[in-house]
């Protein structure tokens, strides 16, 4: 990162958070449970994100400040307590008003490539774009059974920071071997012997597995911890905090 960019980001993070944006923070369900220092850090990250990323509406949708704040706030949860760039390969967020139909192309059984159309709530592209459905964004929560499509799609952007979406973000040296053993190991075990788990819908690929696990960590950490404690522990170590302890469910 250049000196000028670092200086500009420090100035943005140090600015007072605009009062007119305060009401829109309600769209970040995890925010009220954060420590004051984490809240201040998040507000600083939001200001950098909004200064550097472009938003576009699709299918006639108008992107206003509420949309921008809600997306930026949930995405920046992934940056807390870590030295990382601001999703450096991602430049544009495209927002649809509701679930949308998109074409897919993916490997099928026996090496056959499957193609078709499917309804989506979001997607993350390697060439700099995240696509989101606003009605799905509004469903974000923090509690048992909750989901967060923004966290899910921006987890893919973390995965892409090294140039490849393969189920592993840029890792410190001490986490590389545990990541292979725990994250990829759990993925392969579940693929080989499926069982009821909140990660069942992430078995399409290692990249999807990481995104689903990260979404659970920030939306329903208790389910992830109960079903996959070792994976939960490693993700908490990587992100630098323990979301399940922010609210104690069941006493």
Image: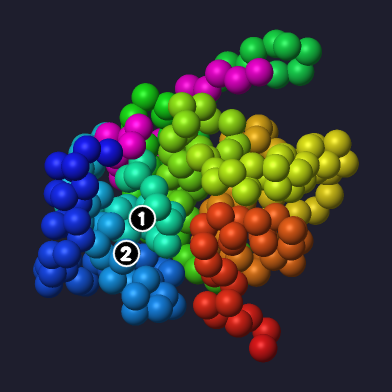
Number of numbered discs overlaid on the protein picture: 2
Residue 102 colored magenta?
yes
Q: Is residue 96 magenta?
A: yes
Identified at 28% across, 57% down, the residue is 45
Q: Is residue 161 visible?
A: yes
In this view, the residue in front, 93 or 7, is 7
Residue holding disc 2? 42
Would you call the spot at circle 1 few (<14 residues within 10 Å), some (14-19), or many (20 or more)? many
Percent x, y of residue 226? 74, 67
From the top left corner, tell me how far across and down residue 91 is, in percent: 27, 34
| Span of residues in magenta | 88-107
- Label for residue 76? 1
Quadrant of the image containing the C terminus: bottom right
Q: In the picture shown, does residue 110 fall above or below 84?
A: above
Label 1: state its secondary structure.
helix
In the picture, the quarter occupied by the N terminus is top left
Q: Nearer the viewer, residue 229 or 114?
A: 229
Q: Are marks 1 and 2 in contact (CB under 8 Å)?
A: yes
Image coordinates of residue 93 in percent, x first then y, are 29, 39
The quarter of the displayed image where residue 171 is located:
top right
Residue positioned 19% across, 56% down in the render: 10
Where does residue 95 sit, x and y in percent of width and height? 30, 41
Residue plotted at (70% across, 47% down): 178
What secondary structure characterizes most of the magenta part? strand
Q: Earlier in the sequence, mark 1 or mark 2?
A: 2
The residue most toward the bottom is 251
Quarter location, residue 179: top right
Residue 50 vertical position relative to residue 116 in the rendered view, above or below: below
In this rendering, the answer to whether 161 lies above or below 67 is above
Q: Is residue 120 left or right of residue 206?
A: left
**For residue 147, side relative to residue 54 (left or right):** right
Q: CA distance from mark 1 to mark 2?
A: 7 Å
């Amino acid at each position: 990162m250049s000196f000028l960019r670092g200086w500009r980001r420090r100035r943005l993070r140090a600015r007072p958070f605009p009062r007119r944006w305060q009401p829109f923070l309600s769209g970040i369900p995890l925010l009220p449970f954060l420590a004051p220092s984490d809240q201040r850090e998040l507000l600083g990250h939001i200001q950098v994100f909004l200064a550097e990323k472009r938003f576009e509406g699709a299918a006639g949708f108008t992107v206003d400040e509420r949309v921008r704040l809600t997306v930026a706030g949930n995405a920046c949860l992934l940056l807390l307590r870590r030295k990382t760039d601001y999703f450096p390969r991602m430049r544009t967020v495209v927002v649809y008003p509701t679930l949308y139909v998109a074409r897919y192309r993916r490997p099928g059984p026996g090496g056959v490539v499957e193609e078709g159309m499917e309804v989506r709530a979001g997607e993350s592209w390697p060439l700099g774009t995240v696509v989101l459905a606003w009605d799905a964004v509004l469903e974000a929560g923090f509690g048992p059974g909750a989901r967060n499509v923004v966290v899910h799609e921006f987890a893919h952007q973390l995965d892409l920071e090294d140039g490849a979406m393969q189920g592993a973000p840029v890792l410190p040296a001490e986490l590389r071997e545990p990541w292979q053993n725990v994250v990829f190991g759990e993925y392969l075990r579940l693929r080989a012997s499926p069982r009821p788990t909140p990660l069942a819908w992430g078995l399409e690929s290692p990249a999807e597995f990481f995104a689903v696990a990260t979404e659970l960590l920030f939306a329903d950490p208790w389910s992830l911890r109960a079903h996959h404690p070792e994976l939960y522990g490693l993700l908490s170590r990587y992100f630098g905090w323990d979301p399940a302890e922010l609210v104690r469910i069941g006493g």
